[in-house]
Image: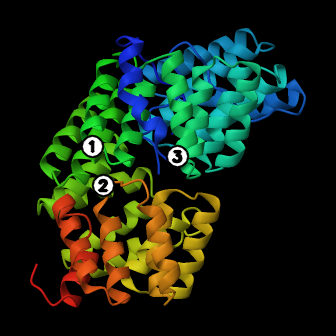
Amino acid sequence: MSEARTARAPGPKSRALRVLGALAVLAGSAGGCSPVPAGEAASPPAGTGSPAAAAADAEPALAYAGGDAPTDRLVAAAQAAVRAHPAEERPYLELATALMRRSRETASKPLMRLAAGAVSAARARAPADTMAMLLEAMILQESHRFRESADVARRVLAAAPSDSTAELVLGDALLELGEFDAAVGAYQAALDLRPDLRGYDRGAWARWLSGDTAGAVEMLELALDAGSPADPESSAWCYVDLGNVMWHGGEPDKALAAAARAEALVPEYVPALLLEARALGALGRRGEAIARLDGAVRRLPTAEALFALGELLRAEGRTPEAEEREADGLSLAKEDPRAVALFLARRGDDPAGALALAEAAVRDRPSHQAWAVLALARLRAGRLEEAGDAIGRARALGTPDARYALVDGLVKLAAGDRAGAAEALAEAEATNRFADDALSAELWSALEVEP
């Protein structure tokens, strides 16, 4: 999740509260609409050096030459404002905001680094500026430094208790840290202050995490109604979130349609390409899925996408290419230990290595996804009782993720509970039979039944 998104003011606040309010009593990653609304710059990394030194940090951002995309034009305008008013912090914040938006549109990590330089220059000029502090918190989240991000957001709220953006940033960090109740409280506070696309999208994801798929779809519709043509990427993200909800509900055709809506707003949008690939693979259109994933990993080579591409290539008999992509994914273990741990644990490869990576993932980012991966890694390492504890934590909210049920089934099977394993397998099949072919096949085979 990152930076600034524009949203038209949506419907009445009372509706926003009614839709999300029930979650406040419940004990994951939120959907990714950026916290910053139009007209608000977000904040950067704390600038402790002199303005002159920080200006040097911003030089790469000033040197960036984009194309003719609307956001590139915003970047150019902000660059001109910085050159005209180099002593002021606001032009640097506007430049950082535009670069962060363009980074999201293009899945470009280098652009996010340019934005960080602009934020540093703004902080050097106005260390206590709350917008600059929020941009800092967002950039920290891009680096998965969620505890630091939460601390910065709390400092903003101490200075500006009615800042809805700070509540959203805090909620995003808390959700990644597994603090679901606190995250929902922050999202609710943001909706109380300013009901808009950003809050609706996060409320939708929180509802899905808590098992309320229908409520999630309702809130995503509110989010899309609140979108603005001035910021198509925010609406594209919401369509991707909607598609992911459809995917998890076992409806790849609807997921594919949602991805197409996102790509119509932002062509070659990487989150949409990833969703399309997943849906196309489930529909048996592996060649198209490979093409989508190949395009995505060329722009943003994440471990998860590389492993998914490798699996599709193997299914097509393209083993050398698959091995190459998997090696690329394994090289990202430090950057994304959770994805690499899952890859190893699914295959039963290197149980000790998978366990170490899964434990590191839970230490740094103890979301429900991380607990599910740790459960599988513990199972492969023969630590059955601890695996049961981990999958219990992963499933505590009732998240309708069929892969959690599959892992639960494998843990129960290892404990000798064949009836429980069969029940978990049936749950997974009813939720989303496309969730994980390898884990499903493992359970079917162990239970000696035909899929």
Left or right: 279 in relation to 306: left
Quadrant of residue 336 within the rendered picture: bottom right
In the structure shown, which secondary structural element does the residue marked by tag 3 occupy? helix
Q: Looking at the picture, does residue 46 appear above or below residue 178?
A: above
Q: Looking at the picture, tell me which residue is in the foreground, 281 or 361.
A: 361
In the structure shown, which secondary structural element does the residue marked by tag 2 occupy? loop
Q: In this view of the protein, can residue 111 be seen by the observer?
A: no
Q: Which residue is mark 3?
A: 180
Q: Are marks 1 and 2 in contact (CB under 8 Å)?
A: yes
Q: Residue furthest right?
A: 50
Quadrant of residue 307 within the rendered picture: bottom left
Cα distance in 3D space between marks 1 and 3: 17 Å
Q: Looking at the picture, tell me which residue is in the foreground, 168 or 283.
A: 168
Q: Looking at the picture, does residue 343 appear above or below residue 208?
A: below
Residue at 81% of width from left, 13% of height from top?
A: 87
Residue type marked 2: Pro
Left or right: 73 in relation to 237: right
Q: Looking at the picture, tell me which residue is in the foreground, 375 or 254.
A: 375
Q: Which residue is mark 2?
A: 400
Cα distance in 3D space between marks 2 and 3: 16 Å
Q: Residues within 10 Å of mark 3 (few under 14, many from 20)?
A: many
- Residue 332 lies, in percent from the top left, at 54, 67
Q: Looking at the picture, does residue 260 appear above or below residue 394?
A: above
Quarter placement of the C terminus: bottom left
- Which of marks 3 and 1 precedes in the sequence? 3
Residue type marked 3: Phe
Q: Residues within 10 Å of mark 2 (few under 14, many from 20)?
A: many
Residue at 83% of width from left, 26% of height from top?
A: 124
- Residue 194 lies, in percent from the top left, at 50, 16
